[in-house]
Image (cartoon, rainbow, N blue to C red):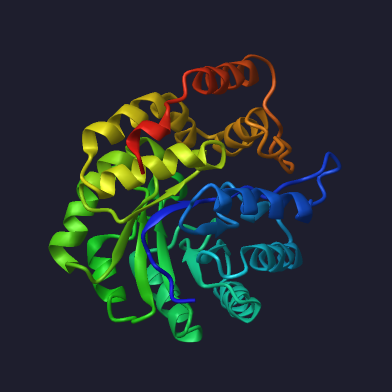
Amino acid sequence: MNVDWKGVYPAVSTQFRKDQSIDLDATQTVIDNQINDGVNGIICLGTVGENCALYPEEKRQVLKAAQEVVAGRVPLIAGTAESITTAAVDYMQDAQKIGIDGCMVMPAMVYRTSDSETVDYYRTLAEATPEMPIMIYNNPVSYGVDVSLDMMAQLAECESIVAVKESTTDTRRITELYNRFDDRFTVFSGVDDIALESLMLGATGWISGLTNAFPAESVAIYKLASQGRYAEALEIYRWFLPLLRLDTIPTLVQCIKLAEQVCGRGSEQVRAPRQNLKGDERAQVIALVEQAIATRPDLSKYKL
């Protein structure tokens, strides 16, 4: 499938049983429900998908299960988070064999690569998988490496690097990318609580965590923004913002999976060393989600 790089792409959760084994059936149900609720694409094995908590073979199993349930209905993108260049090449080549439509690639994990090392990492992956569209995942806040504009200029030479997920938290970067590269790269917002601002500045998509719990509202925000109906999009966004803040804290995976559970869309179970939320923090997230459910906007009035 040729990837249509626009719209709402949830970074879907990987579902675990209480014994911390992967529940592939439940993971497929999560993905299927997201597609049925109108999302435009699926990000599998991103941060919320607990990529770094899976063994290599488990990652392949999840990708196969995801490909089976997506079945070409929307683009399926595989999160790529490896600490060794050759491991990333192997993973992306396997993803291509499985039938994945593109890869969202973080800089090499754990070691904070220099600018030249980062560029060489992405260039090596692009050369090893020339038919696989690559989205650069730029998240310097969480992972300590900023794929700068000058680095993007070097990577523009790689035809298969086509998009960037910007998670800098600085919306000025979106304008800077367009000013320098025009439409060479498709830009996605990667931070939930600046999603609408990013769409207003020209981002063509939103990779979201809280969409796992509230997909219909996320899709409505995107549709309204893409139609220039910003005041109406803002109505939903203001309701959503307290929840979207959960995407920016260290326990974001636990928070999002708990929100899924409260909404009846999945399980809160995470894999160690992560632990399910407890005590006051858990109660606060549940209260926040329940308040959102009680006050959720009537989307029918927007006639989308």
**257 displayed left or right of 135:** right
Name the residue nearer the viewer: 280 or 162: 162
Seen at 34% across and 81% down, the residue is 158
Give coordinates of residue 287: x percent, y percent. 57, 16
> Is residue 136 in view?
yes
Q: Is residue 209 above or below residue 150?
A: above
Q: Is residue 296 above or below residue 232?
A: above
Q: Is residue 291 above or below residue 144?
A: above
Give coordinates of residue 77: x percent, y percent. 52, 65
On-image quarter of the C terminus? top left
Name the residue nearer the viewer: 298 or 228: 298
Q: Is residue 4 above or below residue 286?
A: below
Image quarter for residue 176? Answer: bottom left
> Is residue 50 in view?
no
Name the residue nearer the viewer: 155 or 285: 285
Name the residue nearer the viewer: 118 or 182: 182
Total numbered circles: 0
Seen at 61% across and 20% down, the residue is 286
**232 displayed left or right of 87:** left
Give coordinates of residue 39: x percent, y percent. 48, 52
**29 displayed left or right of 101:** right
Give coordinates of residue 141: x percent, y percent. 40, 44
**65 displayed left or right of 11:** right
Outermost residue on the left side: it is: 179
Image quarter for residue 188? Answer: bottom left
Seen at 23% across and 51% down, the residue is 173
